[in-house]
Image (cartoon, helix red, strand yellow):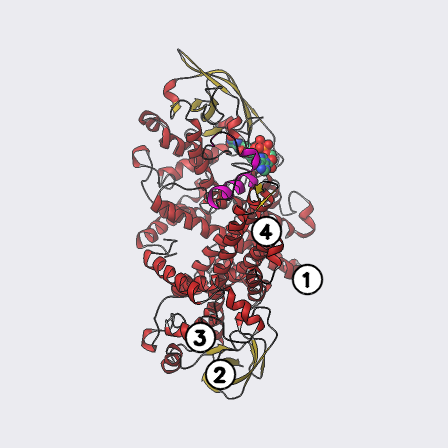
Amino acid sequence: MDFDDTPDQARLRDAVRQFLVDHDSELAHGDGAYLEEPGTDRVEGLRRTQAILFDAGLIGLTWPKDYGGGGGTNAQQAVVNEELHRARVAGPIGHVGLGMCGPTVLGHGSEDQKQRYIRRLLRADDLWCQLFSEPGSGSDLAALRTKAVRHDDGWHIQGQKVWTTLAQHSRYGILLARTNPEAQKHRGLTMFVVDMESPGVTVRPLRQMNGHQSFNEVFLDDVVIDDSERLGDVDDGWRVALTTLMSERMAVGGGGGELGVRSDALVAHAASRLPQLSDDRRRLTIEALGRVLVESLAARYTGYRLQTSVERGGRPGPEASAGKLTAVRVAHATADLGQRLLGDEAVLARSVEGDWRWATSQASTPGIALAGGADEILRNILGERVLGLPPDSARVAPRPTPPSESR
Amino acid sequence: MNFDIDEEQRNFAEHARDFFSEQAGPGTARRLLDEAGDPAPGPRVLAELGFSSLTIPEIAGGVGAELLNMALVAEQAGRQLAGPSLATAARVAVLLEGDEGRLRDVSEGRTVIAVVDGSPAGSSPSMDALSATHFLALDGEDLLLGEGRVSPGEPIDATRGLGFVELTSSEVVCRDARERWERARQVACVVLAAEGLGAADRVVELGIEHARSRETFGRPIGAYQAVKHRLVDDWVAVNQLRSLVWWAAWAADHAPEQLPLAASAAKAYCATTFETACETLIHVLGGIGFTWEHDAHLYWRRAKVDRLLLGDESEHLAAVALQSISAATRAVSGETGTTEVVPV
Ligand SMILES: Cc1cc2nc3c(=O)[nH]c(=O)nc-3n(C[C@H](O)[C@H](O)[C@H](O)COP(=O)(O)OP(=O)(O)OC[C@H]3O[C@@H](n4cnc5c(N)ncnc54)[C@H](O)[C@@H]3O)c2cc1C
């Protein structure tokens, strides 16, 4: 056990810190990973930021060197992430590619696909999206109906996806489709890489409750995908999807990262606001702040512990789901307290001084609690696969059940 | 950075686990509610095995281990509701720092020392007072050691040995002892949280076992989400508590400037985690969980008492908040000589 840096890590930390000071003006900033000011669009700035960080070796540190990564350790990445947070650098725009699509291509793609895709993905030269959810299948992902039928010129895709984050900016997506309608529902799926510029792909942005347009409807009308763009075997897409979902949970909270406004921003906000509160209110607020910070520290160090064990033993297990659950809770409590600290102005979406962070974050956390597996689904996964409790009756199928019945 | 214990520590914890499951257990906690006596395994056995002197330096007859190792043992002690608390042992080791003679008496079991909370003239209920031969108390800025008269109150959890202490003799063992007193209390908070961690872990385990086997309406109750999700939430909290306890215990030896915050975080998080886990267990057990014979209430009793010992949740949450704010303010003003206390 050692929460301190090794000498190598300390050197890395110093170098990163210096780099971020030197390049501060070229980078986009923010107080939370996915926190964007309402009414603004800085996708290009965020892409540039990711490219600068990649060129400096700060993105994809743990990814294989052969494909543009740094071949480093999770601990090194954690050092880098801490420094990025300290310098208030905005989270990577390519988070879906980094957290979900990239690991899936690495795990199941051909050498050619890895060579073509990974480096550009890391650098945000190409953004990626995850085409899993459909109108009729979110939690029950394996019930999806988008079809892929094999022809001489490749696979023909017909169907609709929804809630697809970043689709409108993405060059590629990973697509889960049904290739065998006869098979049991988890057994007839196949994963593909789809070029979002292909004929037949229509993307329609959706406006979310926080006002942003991050997710989209995607219509796939006879889109043709070459067989070489398949990830994994035909009808083995569920296994491939599990790689995606596991990486997703590690990326979204499991590794100890924060999903809402970061706690250091909350502390600074509290420091400036507390003196303006009445004595009674101040006392209550201090206790509430303590509670949020303790939860946040607990989540962070639990994520770090998980990273240490992943580093030793390989792939993240179902326990990564716990990190997402708790990170959502922290994000929610942080937004709530931050907003309440605005006092009378807390009823407005922006304080008189122009602080929009808490109101935006409080309107965003309901989505985080759903994306990447709703809280209930994560609790089922933990209950059944970590605690060994029996499954829900509806999912006790008469036929043998695959490893995980829900996303 | 390495956020895991090593193989040697794992083996050590395993050894402690075997020991406490043989030498202690909820049975003793139940018996002590009806008849007065020492908790198991008791102060002398803990001293003989070197568990209570883990953090006392070797030169004073102790083991000279880091607090993290003490926390690992305390976790196992907590699973079995063992007593006296290793929190008291760790606290005494800090309070008598440098006093080789007296520490040797403790290491070798010649004296059993408890720490008096509140005024030495008439204390608040103080932990492990019932089995102590001597007492440490803070009088103004002076650290006193002496003998005392102990009157027990009616216990909720009889394994905590709580009693009102009145010192009958005393000598000053250290002047200007305030800082040391505070640090000793923080160290004790970490160990108490470690005991709570072990107890809460055991409680969740008991709930899971029951939910797997008990059937209603033709299904195991663990299949119902209302039951399953409650157990999951408790399990998640226990796992998070472990992270805080390990961090705090590590900080005591390697990053003392982080100890006050880490100790308060662990203590506060333990308070709710342990209590909630016990409430879940009793509820999930159904009627059997409400009986005197079942162990559930003995853990619940421990939770209800420990959450208030060494400062309640509100005190520690406020400490976390205020220390974080002052660290952030210092960092902004660029004050030198202070490293960042809060890694937020
Ligand atoms: C902001 C955001 C971004 C997203 N981005 C993407 C993306 O990029 N790509 C993508 O493929 N998808 C994405 N999603 C979709 C997301 O994965 C789904 O919304 C999620 O899986 C839930 O599916 P659903 O919306 O169909 O709700 P449903 O599955 O219909 O669930 C509705 C409610 O029922 C509950 N429920 C369902 N089944 C159970 C059960 N067995 N037990 C208990 N309760 C249950 C759920 O917890 C939920 O509260 C995104 C969603 C959001 C909100």
Q: Quadrant of the N terminus of chain A?
A: bottom left
Q: Quadrant of residue A277?
A: bottom right
In the foreground, A68 or B27:
B27
Question: Which mark is on residue B144?
Answer: 2
In the foreground, B292 or A98:
B292
Between the C-alphas of marks 4 and 1, the distance is 38 Å
Residue B255 relative to residue A361: left or right: left
Q: Callout 3 environment at 10 Å: few (<14), some (14 to 19), or many (20+)?
A: many
Q: Secondary structure at mark 2?
A: strand
Q: Secondary structure at mark 4?
A: helix
Between the C-alphas of marks 2 and 1, the distance is 37 Å
The residue tagged 4 is: B284
Q: Nearer the viewer, mark 1 or mark 3?
A: 3
Question: Which mark is on residue B43?
Answer: 3
State whether residue B89 is above or below residue B313. Answer: below
Between the C-alphas of marks 1 and 3, the distance is 44 Å
